[in-house]
Image (cartoon, rainbow, N blue to C red):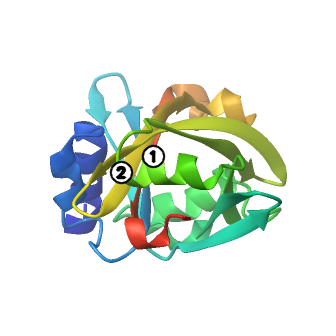
Amino acid sequence: MSLRTMLAAAVLALGAAPAAAQVPGFAPDKTCVAWKTRKRLFVFKKLEPAGVSCAVKVETVPEKDARRLRVVVPIASFDSGEPARDKHVLEILKAAVQPELVFLSKPYGAKEWADLREGRARLLEGDLRVGGADFPVSLSATVADAAAFGSVRTRFDAFKIPAPSVAGGLVAKVAEEFELGYRIPLAEVPR
């Protein structure tokens, strides 16, 4: 497992603790996202694989009197430290249908974005597009060290994706639950 992957796993394991904003796995001047799940090999060995991407594009989308935050993550940019796993993630997240994960926040007004930037808002809501379909998500939101960061614990079936397994789960079985985390420098959060 690469240092970057271990640090991303640490960020997710810590949840939304302010110290997570300083973890070197998430570059301080870049938007980064990560995934983490639990996996059982055979009957007895348990692992917690994680992948991180800092090849993320963030943009503000104007909409009437509000703005949306649009975050685009190339699925191929996730690095778990294991190329075979990264290739499997491409299949799981349906990169052949849609090569990027796209989060589009709900429209927020200037006051709501100010509340998020100043740490008064605790939730960032929107839709996550996976494999050509949109799914509602509510991400925790915390502000520290000039960045907004947080995560969501969810399930594969919430995105109509079966939990991965090998040989019907006899060789390897990934838990149904997984976590998505993010870090966005405040300079990229809409005003």
Which residue is tagged 1? 115
Q: CA distance from mark 2 to mark 1?
A: 5 Å
Residue 79 rendering spot, x and y as whole percentages: 41, 67
What residue do we see at 62% from left, 33% from top?
156
Question: Is residue 172 placed above or below 129 in the rendered structure?
Answer: above
In the rendered picture of this protein, how many numbered marks are placed on residues? 2
Return the residue found at the far top: 43
Position of 28 with respect to 111 (left or right) is left
- In the picture, the quarter occupied by the N terminus is bottom left
Viewer can see residue 162: no
- Residue in the picture at 55% in, 46% down: 112
- Snapshot quadrant of residue 187: bottom left
Crowd rating for badge 1 (residues with CA inside 10 Å; few <14, some 14–19, many 20+)? some
Residue 16 % position (x, y): 29, 40
Residue 133 position, x and y percent, is 83, 47
Q: Secondary structure at mark 1?
A: helix
Mark linked to residue 118: 2
